[in-house]
Amino acid sequence: MNAAEIFYKLDEADCIEEIGGPWSEPNSSNKVLGQSIYDFVIGHFTKRFLREFLMLARQTNLPRSRPYRCDTHNLKRLIEMRAVPMNDGHLIVEHRLLEVEPLPFNINFQMASKKSEARYLRCSHCNRLRKKSTTLWIEPESGCDSGSEILLAVIHTICADCRAGLVVPPLKPLKI
């Protein structure tokens, strides 16, 4: 597998200590060091999902990886996130690009300013969409009317399929 395109080191409280890799922006570390990783994640359920993923790596003391979809407006991208625990409770989190292909048309997602304004829920992990009036999750490029460009107001969440793929062991008892 290729080297990580971006990585960051998290302390035991999930604050960013280091950032690097070819995808990292020059001088980006000045903007993010010392901040919680969750400050850069949109949506309560998405933050919770990430927290549980990182906790799973720490509790089992084993590297954990998950593919996720993170599109640009014109590219469908499959990326792997890998959390590697260190002896001191810190984690190295790596992201690697696995696949990329063009979307048939541009799709721009915008976070709805109010829940009532959003027509869709968007899974922050697999990128599928669900109209608020249905229970069916669909790929964005197959469920939208095609055109040269589409703008969708969404609420970020994690779909049941993605939640089911993450099993968190019970917390270890405290030693007194």
Image (cartoon, grey):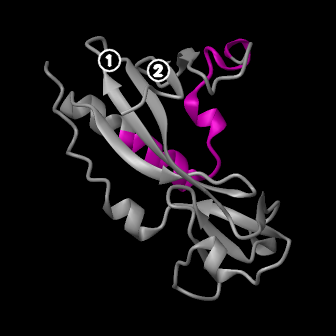
Judge by depth and name the residue closer to the eye, 60 or 151: 151
Discs 2, 1 touching: Cβ within 8 Å: no
Q: Residue at the location (78% across, 74% down)?
A: 116
Is 60 above or below relative to 88?
A: below
Is 72 above or below relative to 12?
A: below
User: Magenta segment, principal secondary structure?
Assistant: helix
Judge by depth and name the residue closer to the eye, 162 or 35: 162
Q: Quadrant of the N terminus?
A: top left
Q: Splitting the image into 4 quarters, where does residue 73 fall?
A: bottom right
- The amino acid at mark 1 is Gly
Q: Residue at the location (33% across, 36% down)?
A: 55
Please give the range of residues in magenta: 29-53
- The amino acid at mark 2 is Leu
Q: Residue at the location (21% across, 27% down)?
A: 61
List x then y, in percent, for residue 87: 25, 13
Circle 2 sits on which residue? 10
Q: Is residue 93 left or right of residue 111?
A: left
List x then y, in percent, for residue 171: 22, 38
Q: Is residue 123 left or right of residue 162?
A: right
Q: CA distance from mark 2 to mark 1?
A: 9 Å
Q: Residue at the location (14% across, 18% down)?
A: 176
| Residue 131 in sight in this render | no
Circle 1 sits on which residue? 89
